[in-house]
Amino acid sequence: MATAEQVKALIRSHLNENPDQFITTALQVAAHEARQGHSELAHEIRQLVDRAKSKPAVIVKFTNDLSGLVFSENPEVPLEALVLSGDMKARIERIILEYRQQNKLKKHGLGHRRKILLSGAPGTGKTMTARVLASELKQPLHTVQMDRLVTKFMGETGAKLRQIFDRMREVPGVYLFDEFDAIGGERSLDNDVGEIRRVLTAFLQFIENDTSDNLIVAATNNPRLLDRALFRRFDDVIHYELPGKEECVRLIANLLGTFYDKRFPIEKAAAAAAGLSHAEIDRACRDAMKLAILSNKSRVTLDSLTELLKERHSAYRGREG
């Protein structure tokens, strides 16, 4: 196989957008493999280089035009970190399975699930699901901030959307359209403005005509506001609820880790967490762990966690008022 120095040189030339150096290094790798007796691999590398030379180089990257609108990351969040009901977990696993075996499906004229709508209250796991999907599929996660797209570029939102979908054809990954209801509102609503209606119509066309293999995930906190035409554009629509008792137990256990033991009355803690979102329970558990550390304790107490969960309940009531 290629030496460590050759691999580093390939990466440097790619990141520095130096195609000539990249090709030179690739040919050096081919020569190295030939010397090792891997003649077939060496031949394949040379063929790839010859094909690359025969067409103009295209360097694709997110330009300043989309700065502040698209954020890219390489999350490392395993599927086990996602605390959902068995039903919901099975649907997420099905998306992952179909993506991984998309070539098998294509041989039978079928496509994999890749346009997914996630709906539900804030903090119930929609964004985390997108991060898990990207992590499990070994793909970067590109998050499109829809609220910024609408407010910052009113009048040219449709053009920006086109740029994003153009990038999808060239830049692989999982694309998360966060706060999707910023453009997804029912087109018949009287208080809707013409610009948003045009943007939604454009989005519907873009998503329907998209032929990439990328996973497209749209997340919304208000599914009732979404245009009905959106739902048939998606391969799957998954609704998120607040965690039930079983999910609360698993979530608290996962979060506290070594900060609790078998004597900890986790059922009581789960009862105190009832009615809170995944995100609120997460914050309360982390606050409880910090309190234990600062108090020089190795375990979280039920009293401290219950009190912190009560604070979260009070914050919810304040928001509702």
Image: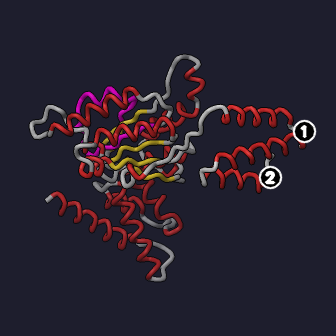
Residue 58 locus on image (x, y percent): 56, 40
Instruction: Identify residue for label 1.
Output: 37
Residue density around tag 1, few if under 14, some if 14–19, many if 20 or more, within 10 Å: few
Residue 45 locus on image (x, y percent): 75, 37
> Which of these two is toward me, 87 or 159?
159
Q: Residue at x 21, y 39 (%)?
A: 196
Residue 105 locus on image (x, y percent): 55, 23
Is-magenta flag for residue 313? no
> Which of these two is toward me, 242 or 245?
242
Look at the picture and state if 4 lies above or below 139.
below
The stretch in magenta equals 215-237
Quarter of the image with the C terminus is bottom left
Relative horizontal placement of residue 111, taking residue 11 as reference (left or right): left
Q: Quadrant of residue 51?
A: top right
Q: Is residue 247 visible?
A: no
Relative horizontal placement of residue 53, taking residue 310 as reference (left or right): right
Look at the picture and state if 288 lies above or below 87.
below
Is-magenta flag for residue 230? yes
